[in-house]
Structures are given as structure tokens and as C-alpha cells.
Amino acid sequence: MTNATELRSGAQILCEALIREGVEVMFGIPGGAIMPFYHAMWEYRDRLRHVLCRHEQGAGHAAEGYARASGRVGVCVATSGPGATNLVTPIADAWMDSTPLVAITGQVSSALLGTDAFQETDITGITIPITKHGYLVTDARDIPRVVREAFHLASTGRPGPVLIDVTKDAQQSRVVPEWDVELDLPGYQFFSEPAPHAVHAAATLLAGSVKPLILAGNGVIQSGASRELLALAEATQVPVITTLHGKGAFPEDHHLALGMPGMHGWVHVNRAIQECDLLINIGGRFDDRVTGKASTFAPKARIVHVDIDGSEIGKLVRADVGIVGDARKVLRELLHTVAADAALLREGGRDDGRFRRRAAWLAEIREMQAEHQPRQAYAQRAHTTGLMPHDVYAALDASLRERRHGVRVITDVGQHQMWAAQLIEWREPRTHITSGGAGTMGFAVPAALGAALACPDDTIWAVVGDGGFQMTNQELATIRQERIRNVKVAIINNGYLGMVRQWQELFEGRRYSGTPLSGPCFARLAEAYGLLGVTVERTEDVGDAIALAQDHDDAVVIDFRVEREANVFPIVPAGRSIGEMITAHEPNDRHEQTQTFRT
Amino acid sequence: MKHTLTALLQDRPGALNRTVSLFRRRGFNIESLSVAPSETPGLSRVTIVVDEPNIDRVVKQFTRLIEVVDVSETASRDAVERETALVKVQPRGVSTAELTTLGAAAGARVVDTNEAAMIFEITDTPDTVATFVNGMRELGLVAVTRTGRVVMPRGAVPLTIPTTTVPFTSQADGASDDVAA
């Protein structure tokens, strides 16, 4: 960087501030109000890579994918007006999924603010409900402090998106930057260290429990607490369930791993929740997709809720013990506190029967699993000779097992997302990345390109429905232009907006209103973008196609044309108790039969 | 159930906007809101009367705002509560002199008067202010401006105390071990 006392434009200062925060890549699209920043960016291009996306939504999701795969702050850039409003969806997505994101937008010159100038929108106002914080910068001298605060806010405590809106004149004006600035955030506090009495109370509940469960959420992954979680589960012999965002926090091939709860959770997992006497939620927020009707959730259990965001504790599900803190630190403290229990287990002879009863509890859950799970996965198998989506997941899962490391999967939103969560065995943190809270269709392809840049040595699978794919498939051009070779797109193509269609089938008398969906030939579309496109229609070709994609030294798009009316089972109808699951449905029978399971 | 919250808010553009937006979005019903500079430069004191059964939830959400330095709930028994109202009256069925006497008996003083209307100022507990305002309705009240409730705890208890700046941790320090996985 240049002489510290030299005059610099706000745009140059912004570049240097980003480099100081460790930013190496950002995703964006230029426009009038952000042009000074792009002008300055050119000087720093060897240290600060800019990836030109085809739509700002793509840029935002790419930054999210980068952040979720790497654990670092993702950065996206847009101009004022429509550029900024196109970022609203990924910002909302990052807000719902607690993804560290800094969004930089250009704004009209400060003299024009509030005059309805060309491409002026109040993006700081628009994003208030969906950002952790937002800044409108009108003075270049504020840039070093604002950038530093923004990255601090985005990445600490409960991570989230922060907006920096910079007026054009602030980018252009020349000042001597003052880098040695203090954070001015007297109102920002988060508590990483748990209160000892709360940890002690949780450990006491655990010691007295014979049917305990751990529910691991996004917080375990965000705080890097997988090892601690494994240690606690093993030391106490407590089975672990993982939320959609907790997938990968705990190895699913472990004898204590149960799978996913909630709307599309396995019968044995939801049953275990309804039967457990203690539920320890670590870093999950009791989303309604997990709890079903919250008042009927875990009726027999004491609840321990661990969250870095105190406002989550007691928000939706009562907590008998609330622990505000970083998941990793809480788990370490808990481990330390339950060490005596663990010693008992190891010595065996001094076991007071508690661990034997916990083993019986696990056996009971496994029995339920053996009875229900195999049927759930292939519920419609008997009625089709075509390619089932489950066959694609089986092959992907086999491929992931074979590679063991270095493969990550980004999913979009819908049926294909739930199948991926259910049917692939997740083992490592940050290998399963999806849009959970906001449920943003169009997330997968751009997020995959961001993840591919964060992890250039890994294979990044984007598993996406034909609906979501068509929302952001223009980012294939970005993948091509940037020579991002490690993205492999698997389209689970059923010619429907499948999850909505499934609800219409199950709950609305099969009135397929607005859900049948056509598209181009996706393989030829990929070819038009200069990428390899493959179409798979037969079960026996799935494995070869996946192997080809893995080995091909460039991005690949595979169009898996699957059975059109396959369903995700089990399903808990929205607003119902997770004890009421529909486990199968036979739409081809003359008399429709719906099998339900009630606990 | 009504609760009185006081908070210190950084005097920054958008801070009040964020506050009001939060209350709207979470469905917390604001009965009155008062904002003015506090004893500390750069910090405004906000007094919000909110009608919400689960006040703990309001406090937790309000505390999450970055510009909010401190939030506390003030119970009326532990604090002095006051509200000021300016009440414009065009006397009806009473003389100006009678009205002035009535006002004085209620603790209100006349701060402006002419042939067309007179203006009372009253500062008292919110209930007393409300009683006075209602009483004036029959006597020719035409407009009222109320400040909303402000509070101050009794004794040595400070109202809200700014917390100290959090230590800075860089992104690298906070990075997880799983990044390389």
C-alpha cells in the first residue's frame, strides 16, 4: 500500500480497508453510483479479486456460498437503486441463516440524497429488518472505521449481514485515511463465555437423564465445535440429531447419530424427540420446520437451549436452562463438568445403571428406525420403472463416501433439498450448505460458485431442482468466464415445482395449480454456456454420469430426468405436531391411501 | 400489560428508524415514545411505553440493536414518572378567568392566552395529565400535545449506564478450525 500520509480517494480507501480485513474475493456488478469503487479496484486487482456475476442476487448468494464454505466473511457489491434492491434477497437469506456477509452498495451523491435522483433507493432503510446493522457513508474519512466495524459485526457473536452504502462523492473525495481508529460500538455486546451456573444446571439435568438427546444446529458449525460435540456425545452416550443447518456438525456414520428432525425428519428422530426426557439444543433456533406445532414439541422433556443470541432462548420453545454463549465454549465447559459422569462410564463397574438405561434408549430408537426408515426412502418405488430421485442421491452418497474428503454439496430449496438432507450421509462441517431459514430458490448455483472459489481444491456439487435452477442459471456464464472448474451441477428435474406439487397432491386434492414447469434442454443450455452438459434418464447411467462429472476438469451440468411425482416422506403437515407424520401415500391407487404415524 | 422501557441510543442516523422498525416488525405495540439527548454527549435517552405481555422478549430484541447501549425496564413504584401536555382551549360555557382558576387547581398553568384561545401547560403523572385533558374536553378543548411518559428511578440508582467498548477481535482470530476441513 502507498504512503500513509498521501491523499486517497474514498474508493481507494475502501479497497485498502477490505484488504486489511483479509478480503481476497468479492462478487458484484458495477453501475453508475459504484463506478469510482470499480475504478479504484483495478489498482488492487492482484490482491482483491472481483468476480462479475450476471445478476446481483447471484453475487449475493455467491458471497454467501463463499462465507458458508470458508467460515470467512463474504463480500458482495452492487450499484444503487435496482443493483442494491437485487441484493435484498441474498441479504435476507444471510440474515435468516446467520451468514457473515458484508454488502457494499453505491449510493447517489450526498447532495442528491432524498431527491428521488436517478437510481436512488433508500437501501439502508429497506434493509433495516434484514441486516444486523447498516451504514450510510457520506464522508470518505469514515470508511476505515465503518469497514472495520462492519466486518466485526458480521463475523462475531451471531454472524449476519451488514450493509455499507457509500455515496458516490464519498468514494470520489480525496482524504488522508486514518487507519488507527477505534471501534465505536458501545451498544454491541455478545457473550461467548457461558455463565458457570447455567452450565452447571445443564450438567445436573444431563446427569439425571436416562432418555437424553442432543439437537445440534448451525451454531455448532459456525463456532467450529464439531470435535467438542463428538467428545460430549461420546462421553455421555447421548444420541445426536442434527437440524438442516446442523448437517455435518456430527458424523452421521457414528453410532450415536440419528439424523434430521422436523417436517421431513425420520420417524425415529421425531419419535425420539417426543419421548426424550432431556433435549439439549446447541446452536439451533427451534425453527417451526424443526418443531412443528411448538406447544406439542418434546412434551416430556426438560429443555436446555444454548445460543450465542440470548433473544433466541425462550422465543419459541420454553427453556428450562438457557445458556448464552459460543457453542464451542459451552461444549468445552459442559465436557469439563460432566467429566465425572464420563469416568463412571469408562470404569463400567461403578455405573449406577444410568448408562445402561441410555443404551436401552438408543436401542429403542434404533428399533423404530429399522422399522420405518428403509420404507420411507423408496416409498413409491413399486409404481415406477423410471429414474427415482433417490437413485441419484444413492449414487452421490456413494461418490462422497468413496472420496471421503474434498466434496461439498450446495442445495437449493424444495424436494431435492430435503432428499439431499435425508439420503446423503453427512460427515464433515461446512460440506452441506443450503438456504434454510429464508428458503431461497435460486441459491444453489451462485452459492456453489462462491464455495468453489473458497475451496478451489474441492468438488462443489450444486444439487438443484429444475425450478430453482431456472431462477439463477445465468450464473453459469460467471462460472465459465471465471474458469471455475470445480462446480458440478446436478439438476433433479421433475418438470414441476415439486414441493408445492407434493403439498397439492397431499393436501389440496391434486389440483396442480401453477406447478407444472417446462424448461429448455439443460444439457444444451450448458453447452451454450461453453460447459459440458449431460442428460440422464436411466437409473443405470447415474453412477457413470456422476463419476464423469467428478473427473471432468471443468464445470458440468447433469440433467437428471426423474420420476415426476416422487414425494418426500415422511412429511409433517404444516402447523401439526411432529408426532403426526405422513409416511407414505399411494396416489396411483384407485382409493388414495395415506399412511400416518402418530406417537 | 403496559411497561416502561428506557434505553440509551447512539445518536446516529437511522438509529430511531431501526428502533421503530423493530417494534413494528415484532408486533410490539408502542403507546408512547420520547427521545431526547441524555447526560452523555452522543447518546439519546429513549423512553418507550409498550403494551406487550412478554416484556422480556421486547427487551431482548431491543438490546440486539447495535446502537442500543442499554435497555432497562422501570417499574412505576421505583421511579418518578412524568408527562407534559400543552392543552389549547377555546372556553365554552366558562370564562377565561374561571378556566384559569380551574386549571391552577389541577396544577396546570396558563402559558399563552388571547381572545381566540388559551394554552395550558401541565406536568404531572401520566394519569393526572390524562384526567386534566379529559376534564378540559367539556370546557372547549381544541388541541392537545403530550410528550409521552418520561421516568427517573428514585434514589441513587442510575437510569441507564453506558457499557464499555468491546475489545476488537479480527476475523482471523475468530476463524474456525473447520475452515480447512
Image: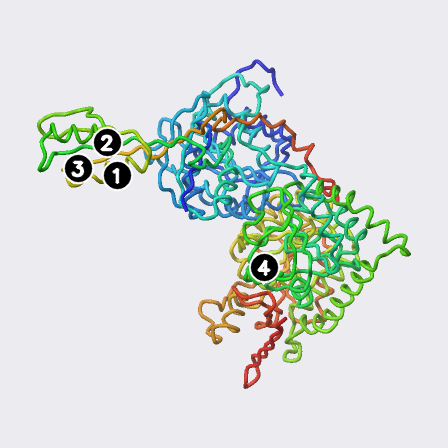
Mark 3 / mark 1, whichever is N-terminal: 1
Chain label for disc 1: B
**Residue type beneath disc 4:** Thr
Mark 1 / mark 2, whichever is N-terminal: 2
Q: Quadrant of residue A409?
A: bottom right
Nearer mark to the viewer, of 2 and 4: 2
The secondary structure type at the circle numbered 4 is helix
Nearer mark to the viewer, of 3 and 4: 3
Q: Is residue B106 above or below residue A182?
A: below
Residue A199 in view? yes
> Looking at the picture, how far across and down is residue B48, in whole percent?
40, 37
- Residue B141 badge: 3
**Residue type beneath disc 1:** Thr
The secondary structure type at the circle numbered 3 is strand
Q: Is the C-beta separation of discs 2 and 4 under 8 Å?
A: no
Cα gap from disc 3 to disc 1, whole angstroms: 13 Å
**Residue type beneath disc 3:** Leu
The secondary structure type at the circle numbered 1 is helix
Chain label for disc 3: B
Cα gap from disc 1 to disc 2, whole angstroms: 9 Å
Frontmost residue, A550 versus B47: B47
Chain label for disc 4: A
Frontmost residue, A260 versus A94: A260
Mark 1 = which residue?
B131
Same-subunit check for callouts 3 and 1? yes
Mark 4 = which residue?
A291
